[in-house]
Image: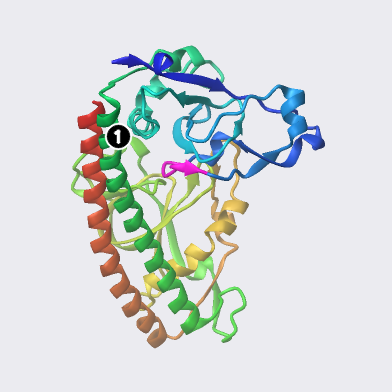
Amino acid sequence: MARLGDVCTVVSGTTPKSNHSEYWNGDLNWVTPAELTDESDTIYETQRKITSQAVVDSSLKSFPAGTVLLSSRAPIGKVAISGTEMYCNQGFKNLICSEKIYNRYLYYFLKNKTAYLNSLGRGATFKEISKSIVENIEIPLPSIEEQQKIAAVLDKVSDLIAKRRQQLEKLDELVKSRFIELFGDPERNPKGLPVLPWHEVFHTTTGKLDSNAMVEGGQYPFFTCAKENYWIDTYAFDCEALLLAGNNAAGVYDVKYYKGKFNAYQRTYVLRLINEQWSYKLFKRQLEDKLLYLQRRSKGTNTRYLTLGILNDLYFMVPPINQQEQFDVFAGRIDKSKLAIQKSLEKLETLKKALMQEYFG
């Protein structure tokens, strides 16, 4: 075992004054924790840029390509690798690796320690891990050759996972294209199809449970406001429905389809079509097109949420039943392909978790 402080140099970030316009919109990469996601790997470009004047006036420290980026607050534990020289704000404790540690090995180690890193957070208003806390984290340290082998195995599994996700995205794009081909752009409605408001399309209700009601290995699906699938041992619904997330920290909502017995979180909207002949897949596609609009309209500060008043402002095209059936058949075939890919993806993700546990404990 080794201390991170003995094998890495830890670089904290600093933010130039936001009210100095001459510090911003330059050509130097400046990264914030908001740019890191669960899928982040290597970052080459940042959303915000700073100027060389900001660097001089604020005494900013850069870090080189290959540095492991670790968000130390809001949120704690997001990880990526810098693809080029960058600067960062104070929400980072970045690690410049010595010759004793391979940066991709360290990257995967930290990816496996999100819960542990959060447990180290200190502070009353918001949790943060300090430079000294990061320096004192211990890491298994086999030879550099063994580190490279471990990282190579995890890279291969990660690449396969990324390809499966890309396949799912391509299939979703295919469904979107088919919808446009059959019905046109729903915003312009070029074919003059009938249009109905939300309350004339859906019977709307919500679940009744807290989000922590989920049960590991439960018998029925439990729909929350997360993208992940959860399970529970009791059901409150036995029907065909769309499940719309009703709150989300960033307002990034999600809509799912299910038919059968299930349960739902109290902020998850359960939507049943008023006309039983209508296609759930067709209205799911239309609702997916409105998620960005819902993100903009949602309320709240720390957690964004949707109200029924916001939803009631939405309108939907209602094509003839025979055209809905045509789209439903096509989308059903795509769903079967997606299911096979999703199962493969889940197996790969399980394999990756097992390997991470084996390598890092």
Res 128 seen here? no
Residue at point 75%, 25% (across, down): 56
Q: Give, as a three-letter code, the residue at label 1.
A: Gln
Return the residue at label 1.
148
Residue 352, image x, y percentages: 25, 41
Specify the principal SS of the magenta part: loop
Query: Which residue occupies the foreground of this view, 163 or 343?
Result: 163
Q: Which residues fall within the magenta stretch?
A: 37-43
Residue 117, image x, y percentages: 40, 23
Res 206 seen here? yes
Query: Is residue 360 found left or right of 17 in the rendered image?
Result: left
Residue at point 60%, 43% (across, down): 46
Query: Which residue occupies the foreground of this view, 308 or 107?
Result: 107
Query: Which residue occupies the foreground of this view, 251 or 214?
Result: 251
Residue 295, image x, y percentages: 57, 52
Q: How many marks?
A: 1
Is 40 one of the magenta-colored residues?
Answer: yes
Residue at point 27%, 30% (across, down): 145
Query: Which residue occupies the foreground of this view, 113 or 285?
Result: 113
Q: Quadrant of the C terminus?
A: top left
Q: Quadrant of the N terminus?
A: top left
Is 165 one of the magenta-colored residues?
Answer: no
Query: Is residue 256 found left or right of 235 in the rendered image?
Result: right
Query: Is residue 20 found left or right of 358 in the rendered image?
Result: right
Describe the element under mark 1 as helix, strand or loop.
helix
Q: Residues within 10 Å of mark 1 (few under 14, many from 20)?
A: some
Q: Is residue 245 above or below residue 198?
A: above
How are the colours assigned in the image? rainbow
Residue 321, image x, y percentages: 40, 84
